[in-house]
Amino acid sequence: MDYFRQDSAHIANGLSLNQPVVKTSENANTHKRWARSVLTFYACLFLAGAVAIGIHQTSFSGTQQHQASLQTDIRSPH
């Protein structure tokens, strides 16, 4: 009558490490596809971060140059 114990045993048997894993070409292809997908995701994330940093650096250095030119204009005698 202990349904929880029966369900737990049923689930745990499917995840047992004692049973050998059946290696098929379908499993290998699935593993390669997932690995490629994860690698592509992180590569795109890295590229997007690099582009964002580059844009930020470009806009930040342009702002500093603009502020520096304004400060020299203010100090010039008129």
Image (tube, rainbow, N blue to C red):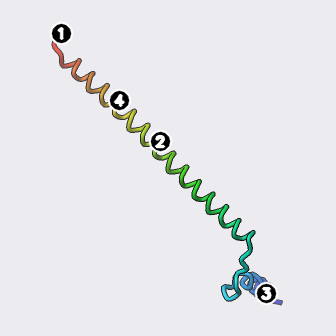
First of labels 1, 2 by sequence position: 2
Give left or right: position of 62 versus 16: left
Which callout, 1 or 3, points at the residue further toward the start of the chain? 3
In the rendered structure, which amino acid carries the disc numbered 2?
Val
SS at circle 1:
loop
What label does residue 31 carry, if any?
none
* Chain-order first, disc 3 or disc 2: 3
In the picture of the structure, the residue carrying the numbered disc 3 is 6
Q: Earlier in the sequence, mark 3 or mark 4?
A: 3
Q: Secondary structure at mark 4?
A: helix
Of labels 4 and 1, earlier in sequence is 4
- Vertically, is 26 above or below 54? below
Q: Quadrant of residue 55?
A: top left
User: Which residue bears the numbered disc 1?
Assistant: 78
10 Å neighbourhood of mark 3: few (<14), some, or many (≥20)? few
Q: Mark 3: which amino acid?
A: Gln
Image x and y of residue 4, in percent: 77, 84
- Give the image location of residue 75, x and y in percent: 18, 19
Q: Are marks 4 and 2 in contact (CB under 8 Å)?
A: no
Q: Nearer the viewer, residue 57 or 8?
A: 57
Check disc 3 and report its element: helix, strand or loop: helix
Q: Decide which of 73, 53 is in the foreground and name it.
A: 53
Residue with the mark numbered 2 = 51
Residue at 51 percent across and 45 percent down: it is 48
In the picture of the structure, the residue carrying the numbered disc 4 is 62
